[in-house]
């Protein structure tokens, strides 16, 4: 792990393989259960609840200790990211860092804003929603993280999300459930920012803390995660109809080949069925269409 405190960027070995990167493109989420050590989780809770004095390792230009205390008590306690123990134990957590390095390239930029999603349980579920300013597109320039410092079983209302909804807007009835980012203390959910989600309904009593922040790409995408010898872009599983074209576009963008991506439609690559007797036609086509991410074409191709 190489961390540059001046640029607030880090580099390390990527931890995802080709197939795992494809899976993220397809599903839009990853869950790392209990990866932050217990003593760091307790410090985070104590800091957020005002029991641990602020001890910033550095100060942004113009910021005073009065600013630090004001920001710490706000709904965006970003100054927790000035604490050494938080940088080392949470932001640069090896398992999180390896994923970020795989999906965002070298010299990953650390977050500058953290928002606190603290809730007193029990509480009803939020409505399903997409977060503000989300963008649907093949680019992956940043990733959203949800950090749960306490044990967060389903009863304590962890984030609930719908895999695969990061490629296009979908409506979902409130009574329809999703998948939960539940886990023991120190669980970190990594999401495409454009995924449909909500705070789940909680039935237990207690305080649920959750911090949300983004990691940032600082270099052009290139395929430098863990290569799998038998991985084949032509036969990889990008998902089903009306979905595979988006996941494959994102994967090609991550490989640095987003501009070359063209698809023929129908049963052509990247769509495939396990029951076909040969690979899909259309892989590597130098003509064809792009997925219509902006939803301006009736047939979904641009
Ligand atoms: Fe949200």
Image (cartoon, helix red, strand yellow):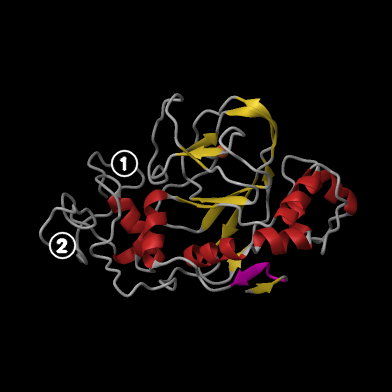
Label drawn at residue 49: none
The secondary structure type at the circle numbered 2 is loop
Determine crowd level at label 1: few under 14, some 14-19, many 20+ residues with C-alpha closer than 10 A.
few
Q: Is residue 23 left or right of residue 193?
A: left
- In this rendering, is residue 210 above or below 53? above
Residue at 57% from the left image edge and 60% from the top image edge: 216
Mark with earlier residue (2, 1): 2
The count of marks equals 2
Q: Position of residue 136 (x, y in %)?
A: 42, 47
Confirm whether residue 291 shows in the render.
no
Which of 294/177 is in front?
A: 177
Instruction: Report which residue position mark 1 lands on.
Output: 296
Q: Position of residue 47 (x, y in %)?
A: 80, 48
Determine crowd level at label 2: few under 14, some 14-19, many 20+ residues with C-alpha closer than 10 A.
some
Label drawn at residue 279: 2
Which of 95/286 is in front?
A: 95
Residue 213 colored in magenta in the image: no
Residue at 64% from the left image edge and 29% from the top image edge: 204
Stretch of the chain drawn in magenta: 6-11
């Amino acid at each position: 792990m190489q961390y540059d405190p001046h640029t607030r960027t880090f580099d390390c070995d990527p931890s995802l393989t080709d197939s795992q990167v494809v899976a993220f493109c397809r599903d839009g989420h990853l869950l790392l259960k209990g990866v932050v050590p217990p003593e760091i989780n307790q410090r985070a809770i104590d800091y957020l609840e005002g029991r641990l004095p602020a001890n910033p390792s550095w100060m942004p230009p113009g910021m005073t200790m009065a600013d630090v205390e004001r920001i710490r008590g706000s709904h965006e306690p970003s100054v927790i990211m000035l604490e050494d123990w938080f940088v080392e134990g949470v932001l640069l957590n090896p398992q999180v860092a390896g994923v970020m390095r795989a999906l965002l390239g070298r010299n990953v930029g650390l977050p500058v804003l953290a928002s606190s999603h603290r809730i007193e349980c029990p509480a009803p579920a939020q409505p399903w929603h997409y977060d503000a300013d989300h963008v649907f597109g093949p680019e992956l320039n940043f990733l959203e993280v949800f950090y749960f410092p306490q044990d967060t079983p389903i009863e304590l209302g962890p984030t609930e999300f719908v895999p695969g909804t990061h490629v296009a807007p979908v409506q979902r009835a409130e009574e329809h459930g999703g998948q939960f980012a539940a886990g023991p203390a120190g669980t970190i959910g990594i999401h495409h920012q454009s995924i449909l989600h909500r705070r789940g309904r909680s039935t237990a009593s207690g305080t649920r803390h959750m911090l949300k922040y983004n990691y940032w790409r600082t270099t052009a995408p290139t395929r430098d995660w863990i290569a799998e010898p038998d991985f084949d872009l032509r036969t990889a599983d990008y998902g089903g109809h009306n979905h595979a074209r988006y996941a494959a576009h994102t994967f090609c963008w991550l490989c640095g080949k987003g501009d070359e991506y063209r698809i023929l439609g129908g049963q052509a690559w990247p769509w495939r069925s396990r029951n076909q007797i040969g690979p899909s036609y259309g892989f590597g086509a130098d003509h064809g269409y792009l997925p219509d991410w902006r939803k301006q074409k009736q047939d979904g191709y641009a």
